[in-house]
Image: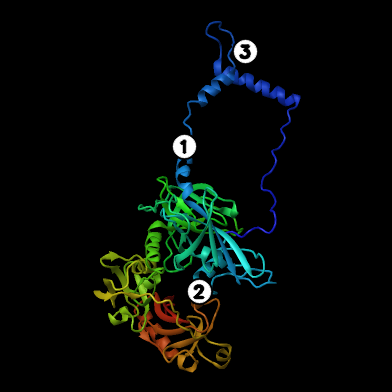
Amino acid sequence: MTARPDHTPPSPFKPARRFGVTARKLALMASVGAGLGLAAYGFSPSTNKADLFTSPAYAQVNHDVSKVAQPIGFADIVERVKPSVISVKVRMKDKVAAGDDDAESPFRPGSPMERFFRRFGGPDGLPPGLRGRHGHGVVTGQGSGFFISSDGYAVTNNHVVDGADKVEVTTDDGKTYTAKVIGTDPRTDVALIKVEGGSNFPFAKLSDDKARIGDWVLAVGNPFGLGGTVTAGIVSASGRDIGNGPYDDFIQIDAPVNKGNSGGPAFNMKGDVIGVNTAIYSPSGGSVGIAFSIPANTVKNVVAQLKDKGSVSRGWIGVQIQPVTADIADSLGLKKAEGALVAEPQADSPAAKAGIRSGDVITAVNGATVKDARELARTIGGLAPGTSIKLNVLHNGTDKVVNLTLGTLPNTVEAKADLNDEDRGSLHGSDIPRLGMTVAPAASVAGAGTAGVVVVDVDPKSAAADRGFKEGDVILEVGGKSVSSSTDVRDAIKAARSDNKNSVLMRVRSGDTARFVAIPIAKG
């Protein structure tokens, strides 16, 4: 979206530079023209003399240009698809208190979208287009969208309409309609709205084909509130993870996308929508040729559920997972760094009931290979709750098949316990010099539980710091064995070294999440 401007920006258009012709330049131009004439014609075959004045050089140049194939434009496609694209204007009350000078982000602090826009958006952490304050406690913004059916259903971004008190859309022919939000899905940033007061809207088709890298793409939207604008580029990459969440699978395009393009479609050369433009990477706030679109197949699945019940339900097996890195693969004795490593199964989850344990590696779902943790999350999330599935799991070096029924992905997040300043000051842990950190029994730290050891201090130049260890982390296992003291940690490291391991695998709890960390160990 893009906020209504408070002042008129300086014009980006510059006057053309005046072109002056001096007598010297004219003489030089004349000599160049004569040279072109000689090169083009040489001597006339009828007179054997130079025929420069009866056969001017420009005639030959124009004749040659007419034979050159003209570039194929996009006008025919644009004429067909542009009427389906709409401008989306929203009004939100109480997003900004009267008297504040800076707008606040509409996203929950720490949420995936808030983290994303803190990283890729402006300094205030607002998404492109929702920047600025108008009136007293009222924010207005503009984004884009497109019809997907003739009866007025349209797609836009969740962050465009999230929290909106009023939604209006303007069609390509300038007509304005009121719209209502049917449903939103923050996890994919997709929203479905319904325009009231019409029944024969031009609409676009979501593509059945997967976008290929190098394909032409047209982005149509409402940048800077200017109205229907078309830009062209190519598909630069696919499967992009921009830190928005576990279901990231964005298409990257280089068609210029700016503030206000959020929610607009990206068309292929068939005129089908391959993606919904949702974010840009821009240190300056404007297009630098890196934009991200939600793939059409994801939009189809989400929109179908939003239209049916106003919300999205996703399958859930109940495990915290992480990628299998080369170091982790080495620690587990795996030949390839593939699959999804189970950091921890959640209590009473389908995975826990099916016997999946921490340290297991999920390698396939219903026979389809799982490349990494993100692919597993997308695969499970794309299945309906109640679906029966088969998981291939590598457990202690042995492959087994686990049958389970998917639950429903919950929306709640468990509370986390951190090491506070008082704990840090009162604890005197034991050093693990080879790793560069100091640990103390978890039982001595309030809220840390009874299992494991708490990291009290980390040397910033150590191997532990390089692997992301920080104060307050709880080490639960080292080398597959539970630990409760610094002695247990040292013994597990010694055993890994005796087995000629280059690294030792630790299971670590940070706040409310658990993960495995492979940390290198020195020989000798």
When the figure is inspected, residue 292 is found, relative to residue 214, above or below; the finding is below
The residue carrying mark 3 is 53
Q: Nearer the viewer, residue 311 or 387?
A: 311
Q: Nearer the viewer, residue 496 or 323?
A: 323
Secondary element type, mark 1: loop
The answer to whether mark 2 and mark 1 are in CB contact below 8 A is: no
Identified at 49% across, 55% down, the residue is: 264
Identified at 54% across, 92% down, the residue is: 427
The residue carrying mark 2 is 466
When the figure is inspected, residue 20 is found, relative to residue 505, above or below; the finding is above
Which residue type does callout 1 highlight? Answer: Ile
Picture coordinates of residue 206 (x, y %)?
A: 39, 54
The residue carrying mark 1 is 72
Query: Is there any visible trace of residue 287 in the rendered image?
Result: no
Of badges 2 and 1, the one in the foreground is 1
Nearer-N-terminus badge (3/1): 3
Q: Nearer the viewer, residue 401 or 483?
A: 401
